C-alpha cells in the first residue's frame, strides 16, 4: 500500500542532517515509492528536523503547521523525524496534533512500520527510540551531482555548555571505515567529497580505541571516483601533526580547514568548556601556515555568551584581526534548555548580542577583503557550480570556498560545464566573493 503513495520530503538544518535525509530518501527508493517536490501532490510528507537552537525548533514547528494546511487537499499523513522529536517528543506530542508519526534520529528504518500502524489503527505512533541505529548506505543525493557530503560519525562527547547536541544525538559514534569507503564509492564521480561530523577530527577513537582520521582520509583518497576532499568541523585540540602532514602532502585533500573556535578569550572559553586558549589557537594557525602556506582557515564564533564583558568582546575583535581567517560565521548566543550555560548569570541582553555580532561581521569583512584582494591578478582553479542568471555569468568555488557557508567565484567564460575545473583570472573582489574570467572569454 505504502509503495503506491506519493511522498514529499523536507530537510531542515545542517549538512549532517542532509545526509540523514538522503539516506531516508534511499529507504523510500528501495520500496519504489514515488517522490514529489510539489507538496500539493504529496499524500505523505516527511519533515526531517533540526533542534539545535530555538530558531531551528521554531522553523521546524512552523514548517509542520504550514504542511498541515495541505491536509485540506490530498495530504494524508505528516511524519516528523530527526532532532526535534528525538529531544522534545514528550513535550510536543499533544500540542502538535497535526503530526501523525514521530521518529527519532536512529529510527528511519522504522518509517514503513510506523506508517502502516498509523493507517491501520488510525493512531499517531511515537517510534522515537525504537530503531536500531543501523548504518544505512543507500542514498539519494540532494546536492548538485558533482559534490556530496560524507558523514563519518554522529553524536559528540565534548559537552560544551551552550550545546544541546550530546543531549539530542548522544555520545560520539564513529561509523566503520569500510562502510564509509563503500558509501563514498557508491556516490559516483565527484569533484568534491566533503567530510562532516559533529567533530570530524575525533574519528575512530570510540570504535578503534585510537584516532583513525588520517587513516580514513588515506583510504578515501585512494578512490578513483573522488577528485578532492574537503574537511569540515575539525576541532582545534585534535588537529595533530600527523593530520597536518597528511593535508600538506596529500594532493586530493584541499588546503582548507573549518576549525570551529566559538570564542577567543580564555575565561569565556573555560565557561564554554572548550579545551583551547587564545594563545593556543594562534600557535595552531602559525603551525598550519608554516607547513601549508596557502591553507585557508575558516571558523565560527559565538558572541553574547553569558557574562561576556565588553572587554572580552573587544578581545574577540582583536583576535579576528590577528588571526586573518578567510571566512567566519558569527552567531548570537542562544539560551538553550538543559545546558550548563542556560543557568549562568548574567545573561546578555539580546540587543547587545545583536550589536556585537554585527560588529564582528564588520571586522571580519575588512579582514576578508584584504585576504581576497591578494588573489587579484592571479589565476586560480575554480570548480564550476553552474550559472548565475541574475549576474549573467558562471559561478563556482575555489579551494577556500565550501558550499553555502563561504563566498563564491563569479566568472565569465566562453563556455563552462558544471562539475568541471577552470583556470580563472581574478580581476576584482569584495569582502566575500571574487570576480574574474577565463582566458577564452572575449567579452568586455
Image (cartoon, rainbow, N blue to C red):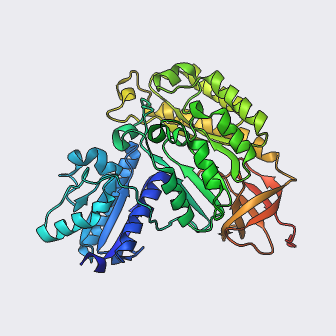
25 versus 14 height, above or below:
below
Residue positioned most to the bottom: 4
Residue 315, given in percent of the width and then of the height, sits at 62, 23
Answer left or right for 263 relative to 125.
right
Please name the residue shown 24% across and 72% down the image.
Answer: 76
Answer left or right for 374 relative to 185.
right
Residue 84, given in percent of the width and then of the height, sits at 32, 49
Q: Quadrant of the N terminus?
A: bottom left
Please name the residue shown 40% across and 48% down the image.
Answer: 56
Residue positioned most to the left: 121
* Residue 136 visible in the shown view: yes
Task: Using the image as rendered, state which of residue 328 and residue 250 is in the foreground.
Answer: 250
81 versus 284 height, above or below:
below
* Residue 99 visible in the shown view: no
Answer left or right for 12 relative to 217.
left
189 versus 314 height, above or below:
below
Residue 157, given in percent of the width and then of the height, sits at 42, 34
Q: Quadrant of the C terminus?
A: bottom right
Res 25 → quadrant = bottom left
Amino acid at each position: 500500500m505504502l509503495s503506491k503513495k506519493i511522498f514529499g520530503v523536507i530537510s531542515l538544518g545542517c549538512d549532517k542532517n542532509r545526509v540523514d535525509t538522503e539516506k531516508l530518501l534511499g529507504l523510500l527508493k528501495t520500496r519504489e515509492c514515488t517522490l514529489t517536490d510539489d507538496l500539493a501532490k504529496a499524500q505523505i510528507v516527511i519533515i526531517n528536523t533540526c533542534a539545535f537552537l530555538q530558531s531551528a525548533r521554531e522553523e521546524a514547528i512552523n514548517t509542520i503547521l504550514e504542511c498541515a494546511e495541505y491536509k485540506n487537499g490530498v495530504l494524508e499523513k505528516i511524519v516528523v523525524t530527526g532532532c526535534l522529536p528525538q529531544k522534545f517528543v514528550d513535550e510536543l506530542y499533544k500540542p502538535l496534533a497535526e503530526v501523525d508519526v514521530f521518529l527519532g534520529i536512529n529510527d528511519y528504518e522504522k518509517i514503513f512500520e510506523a506508517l502502516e500502524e498509523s493507517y491501520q489503527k488510525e493512531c499517531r505512533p511515537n517510534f522515537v527510540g525504537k530503531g536500531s541505529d543501523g548504518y544505512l548506505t543507500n542514498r539519494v543525493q540532494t546536492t548538485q551531482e558533482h559534490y556530496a557530503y560524507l558523514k563519518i560519525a554522529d553524536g559528540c562527547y565534548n559537552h560544551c555548555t551552550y550545546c544541546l547536541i550530546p543531549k539530542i544525538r548522544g555520545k560520539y559514534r564513529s561509523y566503520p571505515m569500510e562502510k564509509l569507503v563503500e558509501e563514498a564509492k557508491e556516490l559516483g564521480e565527484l569533484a568534491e567529497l566533503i567530510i562532516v561530523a559533529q567533530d570530524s577530527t575525533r574519528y575512530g577513537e570510540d570504535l578503534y580505541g585510537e584516532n583513525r582520521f588520517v587513516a580514513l582520509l588515506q583510504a578515501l583518497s585512494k578512490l578513483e571516483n573522488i577528485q578532492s576532499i574537503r574537511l569540515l568541523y575539525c576541532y582545534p585540540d585534535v588537529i595533530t601533526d600527523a593530520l597536518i602532514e597528511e593535508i600538506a602532502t596529500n594532493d586530493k585533500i584541499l588546503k582548507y580547514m573549518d576549525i570551529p573556535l566559538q570564542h577567543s578569550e580564555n575565561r569565556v572559553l573555560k565557561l564554554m568548556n572548550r579545551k583551547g586558549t587564545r594563545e593556543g589557537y594562534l600557535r595552531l594557525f602559525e603551525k598550519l601556515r608554516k607547513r601549508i602556506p596557502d591553507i585557508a582557515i575558516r571558523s565560527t564564533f559565538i558572541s553574547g555568551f553569558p557574562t561576556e564583558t565588553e572587554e572580552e568582546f573587544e578581545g574577540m575583535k582583536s583576535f579576528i584581526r590577528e588571526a586573518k581567517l578567510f571566512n567566519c560565521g558569527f552567531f548570537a548566543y542562544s539560551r538553550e534548555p538543559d545546558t550548563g550555560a542556560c543557568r549562568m548569570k548574567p545573561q546578555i541582553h539580546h540587543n547587545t548580542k545583536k550589536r556585537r555580532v554585527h560588529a564582528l561581521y564588520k571586522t571580519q569583512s575588512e579582514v576578508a577583503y584584504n585576504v581576497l584582494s591578494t588573489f587579484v591578478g592571479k589565476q586560480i582553479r575554480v570548480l564550476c557550480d553552474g550559472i548565475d542568471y541574475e549576474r549573467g555569468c558562471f559561478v563556482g568555488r575555489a579551494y577556500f570556498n565550501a558550499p553555502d557557508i563561504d563566498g563564491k567565484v563569479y566568472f565569465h567564460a566562453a563556455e563552462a560545464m558544471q562539475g568541471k575545473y577552470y583556470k580563472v583570472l581574478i580581476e576584482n573582489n569584495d569582502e566575500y566573493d571574487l570576480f574574474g574570467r577565463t582566458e577564452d572569454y572575449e567579452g568586455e
